[in-house]
Amino acid sequence: MVVLDFERSKHYSFYHMADEANAARLAQLVNQTFDEDNETNTPKIQRVALFLRQNRNFYKYCIPKMISFGPIHNCNKKLRQQGQHLKSQWTSLYIEEYSKEAYNGNKQEAAYYLYGVVKSNIGELKKQYHEDVLKGFTEEELIWMLFEDGCSLLYYMDNVDSTRPEALKLKLD
């Protein structure tokens, strides 16, 4: 028992002699807490890790070739020029199909409804992305982008058929 007290006092005097900056850092480490909030532990849509993008041989696989969905590559002018007309067409076709199912063919009402769904859920949708991905976008820009990208992607997924690319207004070369 006496030995333990001696050991404690020896360690205490070592910590006691540490300067204030080290004492503050040690206190911070000792009292470190870990956020147990599910929101911070939920995986987010994010950019490819920097160490992978810096590898020239791998970087070419990180960039879409013709069309992109979502905010990560939205600022790439080349992709916007190449793919935006397809996304607009597919969005229109999706709204047309959706309006036949839910709105007796009224495309305007269907479009307002689908846009409203995205707008009313924008808070939850933003939580799906890492915060650095959303920098530079206004909320209205995000709503419009996610509305158009979502409708066009749903149309593509419903109609993709490599034996009939004309259904998607594509020509596969």
Image: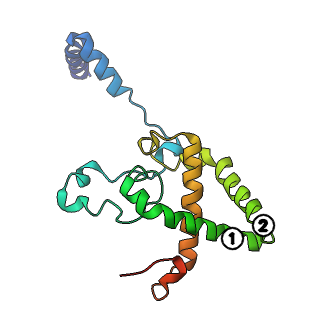
Position of residue 78 relative to residue 36, above or below, is below
In the rendered structure, the answer to whether residue 109 lies left or right of residue 92 reads: right
Q: Where is 142 relative to 87, above or below?
A: above
- Please name whichever residue, 141 or 31, is drawn nearer the observer in this view of the structure: 141
Task: Decide if residue 146 is on the left or right side of residue 55.
Answer: right
Answer above or below: position of 159 versus 10.
below
Place of residue 163 in the rendered image (x, y in percent of width and height, measured from the top left):
46, 89
Instruction: Locate residue 14: give its quadrant.
Output: top left
Looking at this rendering, what residue extends furthest in the right direction? 104
Per the rendering, the mark at residue 96 is 1
Q: Could you classify mark 2 by the number of other residues whose Cα lies within 10 Å: few (under 14), some (14-19), or many (20 or more)?
A: some
Q: Nearer the viewer, residue 63 or 49?
A: 63
Residue 106 tag number: 2
- Tell me the CA gap for discs 2 and 1: 8 Å
Q: Nearer the viewer, residue 126 or 110?
A: 110
Where residue 169 sits: x, y (%)?
A: 51, 77
* Whether residue 52 is situated above or below residue 163 in the rendered picture: above
Q: Residue at x 32, y 60 (%)?
A: 63
Q: Report helix, strand or loop for mark 1.
A: helix
Q: Is 106 on the left-hand or right-hand side of 61? A: right
Front-lying residue, 55 or 27: 55
First of labels 2, 1 by sequence position: 1
Residue at 48% x, 61% y is 84
Residue at 24% of width from left, 58% of height from top? 59
User: Horizontal placement of 163 versus 59: left or right?
Assistant: right
Q: Amino acid at mark 1?
A: Glu
